[in-house]
Image (tube, helix red, strand yellow):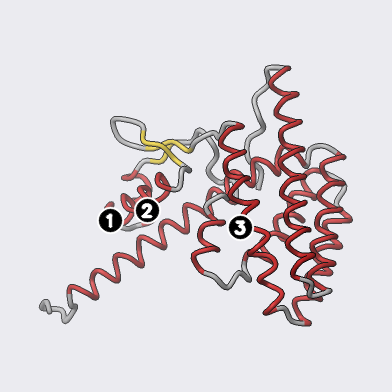
Amino acid sequence: MDDKGVTPMTQRNMTISLVQSVYNELLSDLAANRRQAGDRLVEAVIARQREVSRTPVREALGRLENDGLIESVPPNGYVIITPTIEDIREIFAIRRALEPLAFSGLIEVASANDDTELRSLLSNVQAAHTPEDAATANIFFRNFWMSRIQNRRLKETLSRFHMQVHLVRAATLKLSSGRETARIGAGKLAESYWARDTDAAQDAMTQFVDAALATFEAVAAEKEMAQEPLPKLTG
């Protein structure tokens, strides 16, 4: 124990907590579009902004690099990656395997209050007619079920795909057909949730993920033919 009465174990726990805090804040920045694909992340700058030492920032950036969200850019710093279509497909393969399981698992802890909140969120999705309103409504709809995942590691794994989810949303919801697909998919998810039908919930989420990828691939193919860049993330 040191002179201030803090044990090495306590110090280590404090460092781990601080690393998690910085990591979560950076993930939130990505999700809210405060940081975008192509932006640089500099350890010293982030430490100064967060008013912390550089050690937890360094560890948090290392975690983001392991998550595949940023890449090192010599001599010092990182850049937020711009996912390729191959990256998106690989991530969707993971989402297709995990999200149906995660969503169906919510039914075991569903409540009447949750039902009421979901009705309101679905109503917003169905009423959204502009890309901006649709993006906002779909973000809240996704946040609803993501926040209720009981398995911590499953939740953390899916949370790593914030940037890619937002990229797909930005591309697909610009189309009226994409917004209609999202409305239909959200409706099927909600119906399975209210019915407390785990099999239907898994099927609905699988269809939802597949439809999002198919729409994104169509948009990406059109933009590639027109030699246009994919849209930046929208929050």
Residue 142 in percent (x, y) is at 69, 59
Element type at marker 1?
Answer: loop
Instruction: Say if 118 sits above or below 141 in the image.
Output: below
Q: Which residue is mark 3?
A: 98
Residue 35 in percent (x, y) is at 53, 43
Mark nearer the viewer, 3 or 2: 3
Residue type beneath disc 3: Leu
Element type at marker 2?
Answer: helix
Mark 2, Cα crowd under 10 Å, few <14 / some 14-19 / many 20+, is many
Residue type beneath disc 1: Ser
Q: Is residue 153 left or right of residue 200?
A: left
Residue 36 in percent (x, y) is at 55, 39
Q: Is residue 49 left or right of residue 7?
A: right
Q: Is residue 145 left or right of residue 118?
A: left
Query: Of the numbered discs in the image, which one, if any, rests on residue 53?
Result: 1
Query: Of the numbered discs in the image, which one, if any, rests on residue 175?
Result: none
**Residue at (60%, 38%) from the top-left corner?**
88
Element type at marker 3?
Answer: helix
Q: Determine the residue located farthest toward the top in the rendered image.
A: 226
What distance separates the C-alpha of mark 3 from that of mark 2?
24 Å
Mark nearer the viewer, 2 or 1: 2
Residue type beneath disc 2: Ala
The quadrant in which residue 113 appears is: bottom right
Q: Earlier in the sequence, mark 1 or mark 3?
A: 1
Q: Which residue is mark 2?
A: 60
Mark nearer the viewer, 1 or 3: 3
Residue 65 in percent (x, y) is at 40, 44
Q: Is residue 36 left or right of residue 181?
A: left
Q: Quadrant of the N terminus?
A: bottom left
What distance separates the C-alpha of mark 1 from that of mark 3?
36 Å
Q: Earlier in the sequence, mark 2 or mark 1?
A: 1
